[in-house]
Structure formats: structure tokens, C-alpha cells
Amino acid sequence: MATIGDCLAAATARLRTSGSETARLDAELLLGWAIGTERTAVIAHPEATVGADAAAAFEAAVTRREAGEPVAYIRGFKEFHGLAISVDRRALIPRPETELLVSEAEREVAWRLTSAPRPEGTPSLRIADVGTGSGAVAIALACLLRRRRMLPEVTILAFDVSAQSLDLARENAVGHAVADAISLAQADLVPATEVPFDVVLANLPYIPSADVDELPIAASFEPRGALDGGQDGLVIIRRLVAALPVALAPAGTALLEIGFDQGPAVESAVAALAGDWSSRIQPDLSGTPRLAHVERASAVERPGGR
């Protein structure tokens, strides 16, 4: 009977040959999934033997990964902002860089709920998650706000053009016990019947069409519509920016995830809006431009110069 160390060594070699740039990590994650334990336990006990059923499941998983299928689809979930989000081919796999969108959304909502007294009867804060996909952003935000006991003070609406993605988002919301806090609806961007919102969040497709086919093979398993942002990657994002004068409440804020080189183009799109608008681009922890903050210039100044 093979040991954990034996299985990892053989699988790592196979995955490296198949072209995986994270062969060892892939093998560790898949073996942990097959055994039913954490990756840390796999790393810590290379001498432990692997049972026949786990070995068979691991062999099947490695074969799928050799063909390019993402580890997240094989395991059926992806870790995101401390949560296990169920994923399959119905929606994009949540990326680590999108966690910044959630963190900034939490900061924005918390500031709005605590910066001034909210007398009894004050309407709840309205939040839109546009292009929700698996529901990762809306669900992670709801869980954070629940932890801070702020969830009863907000209304979260999540939209997606794909009915299949919404089904997956609904399953995830139920799994994380926030289904009652998030309303899901099929819509192209923001439906006119639901505006305005105090906070608009969006992780929309932003990869230029010509670049999608050049992505690693794992991306070919994901819905192309969740990746392809049109000729320059900004076709859908520009449509949302153009909708913000109606979609946002007068003092509202939009947080839009963007590509590393798209900041100037997004700022130009915001500057072209009727009225007086402001925008700034926030880098992620690696220093890569990642998040566009958009609001009317007359919006209340935030602490720290915002």
C-alpha cells in the first residue's frame, strides 16, 4: 500500500509533465481531498499509508488534472475569504484577488452604518452584487456583516445574466446560511426596477476577447462569458459605469474589479459621465491596480482622504 509521500511524488511528476505550474500544490490539495483531510495533514504525515478507496479517487483526480481541469472543479469547492464556496462549470472559480473587493465592501458598508446615527425606521442599506456568478462576493460579505451584527441593517441583491450561475449561487447561499439575507435575480447588469443602491459591487468579465484563448488550459473549463470582456476587456464594465448615474443613490459608491492595465480607461469612462464624478484605482497587496472606486464628487468624504 502506497504512502502519502509516494503518492505525492508520483502525482507531482505527472502533473509537472502535463504542464501544471503548481504541480506539487495541486497534488497536495487533491490527495487531501481524496483522503478527506486538510492539505496540512498531508504535508505533515508523508509516511502514512493511503487506503485503496482514497488511492482510486486520487488517481481519478490526477487524471482529470492532467487533462487541464481546475483543481477547484475536481474538488467541488474553492476557498474564498475563509469560506468553502461550491464551484462547478456553471460559474467562474472565485479568484484570490477578488477578496479585495469583499474587504473594501465590508469597510464601505461598516463606515456607512457607523459614521452617523441611524434613527429607528431608517431604511436598510441597499447593496447590489452585479454578475454574482457563484455568489462568492455577496455571500462572503453577508457572512462578514453577520459576524459584525450588521446584516439586519442591509439588503443585498445579487444579479447575474446566467440562470445556471444563479442556481449555484443559491446553493452556496443556503450552504452558508445566508439565503434569507441575499435576494438573487436574473438580470443584465442592474435592473431598472431595483435602483438605486447605496453600494454597487461588480467583478465583471474584463479579459480582452483575443486573450481568453491564450489563458492556461484550466480557464477553458470555465464559462467563457464569465471571462470575456469584449475587444478591450471593458465592454461590460463600461456599460455598468454608464448605468451608475441611475443605479447609484446620490451618495452611493461603486466598487469595480478591473484588469491590471485598465485603470486609466475606467477613469476616462467615469470622467465622461454627465455630472461631477470621481474615481480612484486601488492596488491589491501585490501592488497591482485592482479596484476602481467610483462615486459622485459630492459624496461625503471618507476617513483617510477618500
Image: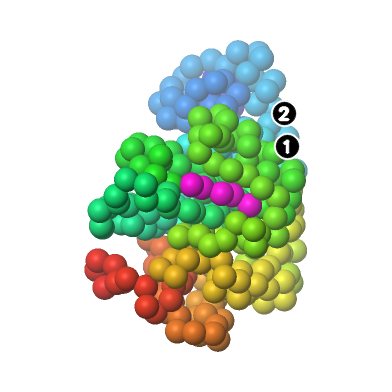
Q: Nearer the viewer, residue 288 or 32?
A: 288
Q: Quadrant of residue 298?
A: bottom left
Query: What's the residue at 57%, 61% (across, down)?
Result: 195
Relative horizontal placement of residue 188, taking residue 294 as reference (left or right): right
| Viewer-nearest residue: 117 or 241 | 117
Would residue 68 be counted in the magenta stretch? no
Q: Which residue is mark 2?
A: 60
On whether residue 157 falls in the magenta region, the answer is yes
User: Does residue 274 appear left or right of residue 226 in this picture?
Assistant: left
Query: Residue at left 24%, top 66%?
Result: 303
Q: Which residue is mark 1?
A: 64
Mark 1 neighbour density, 10 Å: few (under 14) some (14–19) many (20 or more): some
Magenta: main secondary structure: strand
Give the residues drawn in magenta, as a range.
155-159
* Distance in Å between CA atoms under marks 1 and 2: 6 Å
> Along the horizontal axis of the image, is 266 left or right of 198?
right
Amino acid tagged 2: Ala
Residue 254 picture location, percent across and down: 48, 65
Residue count near mark 2 (Cα–Cα under 10 Å), binned few <14, some 14–19, many ≥20: some
Q: Position of residue 56 (x, y in %)?
A: 69, 20
Instruction: Name the quarter where the C terminus is drawn.
Output: bottom left
